[in-house]
Image: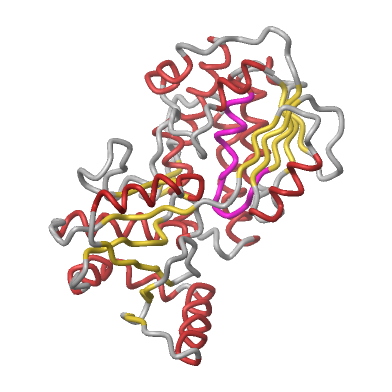
Amino acid sequence: MQQRIDAFIKLGEFLSQFSVSGIKKKENITFNDLFFEGFKHQVKIAEENNSWFTKDNILFSLGSWSKTLTKQNISAWTQNIKINKNTKTVAIIMAGNIPLVGFHDFLSVLISGHAVLVKQSSNDKNLLPYIAKYLEYVAPIFKEKITFTEEKLTNFDAVIATGSNNTARYFEHYFKGKPSIIRKNRNSVAILTGQESDEEITNLSDDIFQYFGLGCRSVSKLYVPEGYNFDAFFNGMFNKREIINNAKYANNYDYNKAVYLMSEFDLLENGFLMIKEDESYASPIATIFYEYYTDINTLKGKLNADSEKIQCVVSNNFTNTEIKFGDTQNPQLWEYADGVNTLNFLAKI
């Protein structure tokens, strides 16, 4: 266990050279001469292969993981883990909506001592194999523990699969004979009262726009009180106005705006973001849905009833499990994607 922990700490140190502030080679990083330039190249290739994976979004993900993979964090996360000495092979089917979206599952399987069989999304296939190779150099115990495949999954004991609600039904049928975690669509919401500070609303723009809103932790729905004035909200979003310069985002904005106007929906927009009153949780790119509420307790009951559809609730003194404004894209290791403790699952297979 300590060897595995030490390996991921070294990986965190390696990734600390890649952040939104820039890519800068550091001294005294294990195997840096062997891997730094190669990984820098993989960042470039990942950006070229997926136009949603901008350099800033890739570097944000890498920087976030570098801050997460510290001795303090990993030790706190694993301190109560029960090691299953019967090593198993765990298959992971990864999504590709944001850079390294499946890394937490990958980390969980390896830190638990199991072998991992990875089926990546074609949208995010460049970064993780290189990271895996780095880990094998840092800790040879990982050799023969990490396998990537593009073929049909075979010879595994358990599975962690992430996909849409439709693919989840297929996963549940196909893997019904195996221990599994099947992840479905989830979205995040923000509860506004009208009393938020300018800083909180500005921070909310990070929750909405990071990764173009493609992550399950991205806020796609607002709950606002009756009579809410959206001026403060739009003012807080203004710092992200440059996002419209991304061609793919702009195309989605133009398309969705045209659809809404032709359908004669009421909407508010500021040139790079539209807001539309809608009961759904999942909003299209460049759009945020909103819904009015009149009673806090009724709203709490609604969100509790829909808990399986919701990843994060961003608010201030609304619930004891809330996320602070601006923090949705910086989860701790123990904040699991769907509330299912992956380490506990892996200890029991």
Question: Residue at (72%, 32%) from the top-left corner?
Answer: 159
Question: Residue at (65%, 23%) from the top-left corner?
Answer: 137
Find residue 140 and report its horizontal and vertical position in percent: 68, 17
Find residue 304 and report its horizontal and vertical position in percent: 40, 45
Would residue 64 be visible to someone looking at this image? yes
The one nearer the camera, 248 or 32, is 248
- Picture quarter containing residue 143? top right
In the image, the segment drawn in magenta is: 94-109
Colouring style: secondary structure
Give the total number of marks visible in the rendering: 0
Q: Is residue 257 left or right of residue 268?
A: right
Whether 101 is among the magenta residues is yes
Q: Residue furthest top?
A: 85
Would residue 273 be visible to someone looking at this image? no
The one nearer the camera, 230 or 93, is 230
Find residue 207 and report its horizontal and vertical position in percent: 36, 54
| Residue 39 versus residue 109 in the image, above or below | below
Question: Residue at (40%, 70%) from the top-left corner?
Answer: 243
Q: Looking at the rendering, in which quadrant would you find the N terminus?
A: top right
Find residue 44 and report its horizontal and vertical position in percent: 58, 55
Question: Residue at (56%, 27%) from the top-left corner?
Answer: 342
| Residue 321 versus residue 265 in the image, above or below | above
Q: Looking at the rendering, in which quadrant would you find the C terminus?
A: top right
Whether 188 is among the magenta residues is no
Q: Is residue 141 left or right of residue 55?
A: right
Q: Is residue 153 left or right of residue 261?
A: right
